[in-house]
Image (cartoon, rainbow, N blue to C red):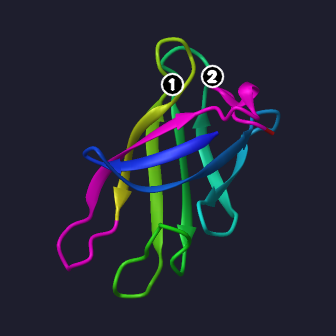
Amino acid sequence: MDIVVKNGVTEIASGTLTVDTSTTPPTGTFTPTGGTEITCNVSAWSSGPSGATNWSFRITEANGDFPIKENGKGYTYNFIGNENAEGSDPSGSVNWPSTSPKEDETVTWQGEATVEEPSARGQGAG
C-alpha cells in the first residue's frame, strides 16, 4: 500500500508498505520513495473497522525522504494509526526528526491500496 507522510497539507515523504498478516505476529517491509527496502516491526495490524495499524522502522542513515537526526545516531519512526470505519485506508501520526535540538515533530500519515494491489487495502499485501 502507498504511504504518504504530511506536515499539515505538505507531503514530506512517501513509500510503499507491505504487511503480511498470515504470520503471527504480522511482518512488514517499507520502501521509501527513492530509497531502499527496510524491515518493519509491525506491532499491531487489524483490517477491521477502526482497527489498530501500528508499525515502526529504524534507519541509521537517510533513506529516501526519511532523514535521521543531526547527531547521526539513527532514528526510529513510529507509525501509530487506525483503519477507517470501513476497515480500509489506515492513517495516523508519526514522529518526525527535528533538524535542531528541539523536540521531534508529530506529522500525519495516510495509507491507500495501490491500483496494482487492491487487496492491500486494510490488510497489507504479503
The quadrant in which the C terminus is found is top right
Q: Is residue 113 magenta?
A: yes
Q: Position of residue 33 (x, y in %)?
A: 59, 60
Left/right of residue 55 with respect to residue 114 in the rendered view: left
| Relative side of 23 to 66, left or right | right
- Image quadrant containing the N terminus: top right
Q: Which residue is mark 1?
A: 83
Mark 1 and 2 residues: CB-CB less than 8 Å, in contact? yes
From which residue to which does the magenta span run? 97-125
Q: Secondary structure at mark 2?
A: loop
Q: Is residue 48 left or right of residue 23?
A: left
In reply to whether residue 121 is colored magenta, the answer given is yes
> The disc labelled 1 sits on which kind of residue?
Glu
The quadrant where residue 39 appears: bottom right
**Image coordinates for residue 41, horizontal then vertical, percent:** 62, 53
Image point (76%, 36%), residue name:
125
Task: Measure how far apart labels 1 and 2 are at the Cα level.
Answer: 7 Å
How crowded pointer 2 is (Cα within 10 Å; few <14, some 14-19, many 20+) is rated as many
